[in-house]
Image (spheres, rainbow, N blue to C red):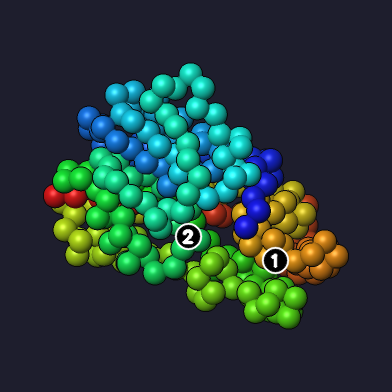
Amino acid sequence: MAWNSDLYHRYREARSAPVDDLLALVPGLPYRDVVDLGCGTGEPTRRLAEHFPDARVLGLDSSAEMLAKADASGQPNLRFRQGDLLELTGEYDLIFSNAALQWLPDHPALLARLWERLRPGGVLAVQVPANHDHDSHRLLTGTAEAFAAELGGFTRFGTAHGASPVLTPAAYAEVLDALGAAEVTALSKVYPVVLPGAEGVLDWTRGTALVPYLSRLGRADAARFTAAYLARLRERWPGERVYYAFTRVLFTARRG
């Protein structure tokens, strides 16, 4: 997928609030090695490096476009690397991931794989969007189904090619407990953002949910897809103001 960092950052302030909350859940321990999975352009990664100056902090992301905007200057304990988080190697005291794991299927298996990369006493801290049942996503799925031929059958949210892989807070807590977590915090929170009508909803999704669909289409088909999606959004939100209630799941767990 080709990510556009400028589009993603258009609502930087609204997207930063969940990061603040996730960082607040991370215990203040003497971490030595920290990795930020799906670090994007690296703003949360820099904050981790500043917050834990004695730790070696790695930002890992598969997108060259995003990493091109990542800046490690002035942070001697910070570095960035392009790579697949499913191929993560090494051992860490803190594995941090903000709004990235929702693109990967089978979260129980994924958490088990990440758990193996934690040292004893290490912490896993994750935030994932849980907005897959919101009308913006429902209408996006409907649009994708109408363009199934052009998309090569790619018609559902994320890369799971099916229902969203994101679990409930209770389900994450149960999975983490089964892995042997000594301490688990799991919660759901709504982060509302007010958008300027249907066009605002379209603009919001351009930086995230629309990306895997438009990246599979040529320019003409992408324009047709966007217009069809916008028509559905306008039917759902005909006014000039949309209260977009964005739900996210946050959890932390410490390995015993």
Crowd rating for badge 1 (residues with CA inside 10 Å; few <14, some 14–19, many 20+): some
What numbered label is drawn on residue 237? Answer: none
Amino acid residing under circle 1 = Arg
Residue at x-position 20% and y-position 45%: 119
Residue 110 percent location from the top left of the image: 35, 62
Task: Determine the residue positioned at 73% across, 80% down.
Answer: 149
- Asked whether, in this view, residue 76 is left or right of residue 25, the answer is right
Q: Evaluate whether residue 99 shows in this view.
A: no
| Residue 63 point in image, percent of width and height | 57, 48
- Residue situated in front as seen by the camera: 188 or 5: 5
Crowdedness near tag 2: few (<14), some (14–19) or many (≥20) residues, C-alpha within 10 Å: many
Q: Which dot, 2 or 1, sits closer to the camera?
A: 1
Compute the Cα span from label 2 to label 1: 19 Å
What residue is shown with label 2?
Answer: 102
Residue extending furthest toward the top:
74
As helix, strand or loop, the secondary structure at mark 2 comes to helix
Q: What residue type is labelled 2?
A: Gln
Q: Name the residue at 37% across, 41% down.
A: 35
Residue sitting at x 26%, y 45%: 91
Mark 1, residue position: 216
- What element does badge 1 sit on? loop
Which is nearer the eye, 204 or 95? Answer: 95
Give percent across and percent down for residue 205.
66, 55
**As drawn, 126 above or below 232:** above
Give the vertical position of 34 relative to 193 (above or below).
above
